[in-house]
Amino acid sequence: MRLRHAIPILAAAASLALLACGDGEPNVPSSDATGTTVTATAPGTTTAAAPGEGSPTATATTVITPPATSTAAGTPPPLATPRASAPRPVSTADAFGGRRFEKPTELGEYPGGYFVAEQVGTILRVTSSGATDTILDIRDRVLSAGNEEGLLSVALDPRFDRNGWVWTYYSMANPRRSVLVRYTAGAGGVIDKSSALMVLEQPQPFANHNGGAIRFGPDGLLYLGLGDGGSSGDPRDNAQNLGTLLGKIVRIDVRNSSAGEPYRIPQDNPFVDRAGAKGEVWAYGLRNPWRMAFDRDTGTLWVADVGQNAVEEVNTVRRGQNLGWRIMEGDRCYNPSSGCDRTGLLLPVAAYTHTGGRCSITGGPAYRGVAVPEVSSTYLYADYCSGELWALPLDGGEPAIVARGLNNATSMATDSAGRLYLLRQGRPIAMLVSP
């Protein structure tokens, strides 16, 4: 797979405490003397309008209030055609009346409006004006002591309108572990706390690298990204060990989950017949997959994997693939147990280094909508520290920086009208808009 060339270095905000990355290590600049990365910039990327670095929004100061939705799953927006030109700069505006959220990790449409998950362990329903009510409070169950622990992902079941199932992924204590738990929404959309069904538990040796994104694929199955277990440099080599779920993309069938059978392992998973391997594993060799997204046109799974001290990466992941960690960090040799044999490893489709204050990738959607035509048919990703937002054409081409100043980005989302949202810690949720 061809790697892209170098993005010019841009000034960026100072490094902050990270949700998605933090080893508690300093950001060590790349050994690349030029300060360049393995991705390429498209023409015009330096023209994105933005105020001074560290500004909370890219351009706009107006507040946009999306209309509240009455159902969880609306009609999908029309698909954009493949790009004929490079992505172009976009503006942002504060959504939901400019209401601030402390540590938001997930957003989606929900009866009566939208839901926003907070890392501490609450799910809020928010209206277009920014009014909120709490529809689930599990702070007494969620471990959020570590900077990367907490309620990390929420997804509505594909049949939510019929079964009311809400899927959650969060940290728990005694012992420290990550759990996949299904809840059921009742009357008025309030989620019944007593309906919890423990579906999957994964012991966590350390407090960081919990990964964490629940996504339902076009096959109706549940995909879950798990980090390598933490500390620094994957000291137990979990990501390359098929006998653990740490450092993996998990694929399970939860369509008929029950207390007696929380999930089934699909028989077409790649390692179901391999001795010593976990049948749940779909792909491996990940460090800390912070956000995933399916391209609803092609079914391709896009994964943003947070790097160690040098390289952040974007991958397109398919069945049985090895993404390389800890043999590789991005496209670079890292800490192989024997040599640096790249045979069979999937190298990233895009990457960037920790230059200019960059520190941790936040993956976004594979956007095929038409509401923001400047970035239609692109995969979006941001850096938590620098606040830069990239758009990488889904059908081939070079990534472009389309906005700046979006610091503290933790997640992105789209709705059934094709609107694009970017979640940030301690800030209003930003909506991407045409300039």
Image: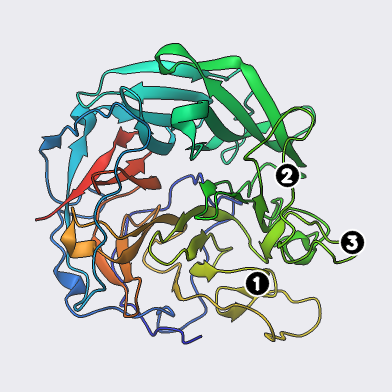
The amino acid marked with disc number 2 is: Phe
Q: Are marks 2 and 1 in contact (CB under 8 Å)?
A: no
What x and y, as percent, mark residue 122?
49, 23
**Front position in the image: 295 or 411:** 295
The amino acid marked with disc number 3 is: Gly
Front tag of 3 and 2: 3
Count of numbered circles in the view: 3
Quarter of the image with the C terminus in it: bottom left
Q: Which mark is residue 276?
A: 3
Q: Which mark is residue 4?
A: none
| Distance between mark 3 and mark 2 Cα atoms | 23 Å
Q: Who's the residue at 48% across and 82% down the image? A: 32
Q: Who's the residue at 66% across and 53% down the image? A: 250
User: Does residue 286 appear to the left or right of 263 in the view shown?
Assistant: left
Q: Residue furthest right?
A: 275
- The local crowd at label 3, few if under 14, some if 14 to 19, many if 20 or more residues have their Cα within 10 Å, is few
Does dot 1 land on a helix, a strand or a loop? loop
User: Does residue 177 appear to the left or right of 75 in the view shown?
Assistant: right
| Disc with the residue nearer the chain's start (2 vs 1) | 2
User: Does residue 391 appear to the left or right of 184 in the view shown?
Assistant: left
- The local crowd at label 2, few if under 14, some if 14 to 19, many if 20 or more residues have their Cα within 10 Å, is some
Does dot 3 land on a helix, a strand or a loop? loop
**Front position in the image: 184 or 431:** 184
Does dot 2 land on a helix, a strand or a loop? loop
The residue that label 2 is drawn on is 206
**Front position in the image: 167 or 237:** 167
- The local crowd at label 1, few if under 14, some if 14 to 19, many if 20 or more residues have their Cα within 10 Å, is some
What x and y, as percent, mark residue 118?
46, 29
The residue that label 1 is drawn on is 321
Q: Who's the residue at 67% across and 66% down the image? A: 285
| Disc with the residue nearer the chain's start (3 vs 1) | 3
Q: Are marks 3 and 1 in contact (CB under 8 Å)?
A: no
